[in-house]
Amino acid sequence: MKHSHSKIQTRGGVSLHMTVYEAETDSAPGATREMLLLHGWPNAGRIWEPLAQALTLADPRLRCFAPDLRGYGDSDRPESGYHCETFADDVLDTAAALGLKRYTLLGHSMSGKIAQIVASRQPPELCTLVLVTPGLLAASPPVDIAGRKAIYGDASQVRDLVVGWAAHPLPAASADLLVEDALRMDRAAWNGWLAPMRDEDFFRDAARITVPTLVVGGGKDPQRMEEELRRGVVAQIRGAEYARLPGSGHLPHLEEPDALAALIVNFLDRLPGGERVSP
């Protein structure tokens, strides 16, 4: 797999760092499949490398775009804009800047919520939606917000938090990357997801999602119970499919990237060109 880096700008002037992953050769038959990968909290775009590797091996036509969202990774760190609708605006600006014509949008955790908001706006270029252990469009269940805000910048406590979301011990390199990205993100972005973004309620927008949707849950996810995903996400999106990785926690793109890639590619292969779901 090869990768490249670039910068794009949103309409508001925020510069976002972009990593593009694609197969080493472009000799695969058929049109290129474009996928926009949105990382969760408190990660950055490079978290997707294991999954991008598995995806481009499973389907060399895939070209994966992984931005660092505002306040994360190597992107700009504006003082404001840490609201779900602003992040959704950034995603649409990113797709436009990249010139994506027919793309799959994949969101994990926090960005599962953002991806659903984007899909509810029905951009004509969006053809499929993949949600990996996603946040809910409705307000999220309560957690210790004050406690999570308090550990910002504390390497030991951050490690305990983010590594604990996996069902089994992660490779050392993956665990270190999780911690590094959490420590280098902006405090405004760290706090922004915790409040107000978790509590922003877009539940009614699910009825406007019309693209084929795959929701992936982990059987051992300590953050998103499967029943919560079935009720709060799958049942709210017309025609949505649910797939589970029984041995995975909240980070299947790191825990089981090959299995996750197989689910995604099989889902895409079964779709007749990514048509929208009939009302």
Image (cartoon, grey):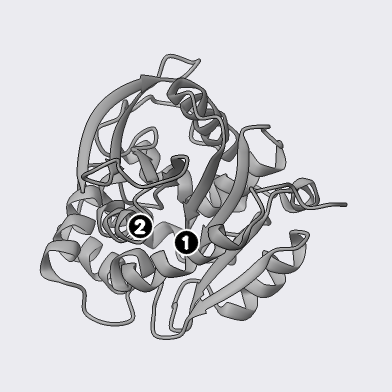
| Residue occupying the point 53% across, 46% down | 104
> Going 28% across and 37% down the picture, which residue do you hit?
19
Q: Residue 46: give x, y in percent of width and height.
A: 25, 47
Taking the image as shown, residue 110 lies to the left or right of residue 228, namely: left
Percent from the top left, x then y, of residue 57?
29, 59
Instruction: Give neighbour class at mark 1: few <14, some 14-19, many 20+ (Cα, 10 Å).
Output: some
Residue 204 appears anywhere in the view:
yes
The amino acid sitting under disc 1 is Val
**Answer yes or no: do the residues labelled 2 and 1 have beta carbons within 8 Å?**
yes
As displayed, is residue 224 above or below residue 3? below
Q: Amino acid at mark 2?
A: Leu
**Cα distance in 3D space between marks 2 and 1:** 7 Å
Which residue is situated farthest in the right direction here?
279
Q: Is residue 251 visible?
A: no
Q: Residue at x 43, y 83 (%)?
A: 220
Question: First in sequence: mark 2 or mark 1?
Answer: 2
Total numbered circles? 2
Q: Which residue is mark 1?
A: 265
Residue 142 in which image quadrant: bottom right
* 261, above or below 243, in the image: above
Return the x and y of residue 24 as percentages of the image width and height: 21, 45
Q: Secondary structure at mark 1?
A: helix
State the SS at label 2: helix
User: Camera-side residue: 264 or 187?
Assistant: 264
Q: Residues within 10 Å of mark 2 (few under 14, many from 20)?
A: many
Front residue of 70 and 143:
70
Q: Which disc, if any, is residue 55?
A: 2
Give the residue furthest to the left. Answer: 172
* Left or right: where 176 falls relative to 90: left
> Residue at horizontal 75%, vertical 63%?
239
**Residue 255 lies in what quarter of the image?**
bottom left
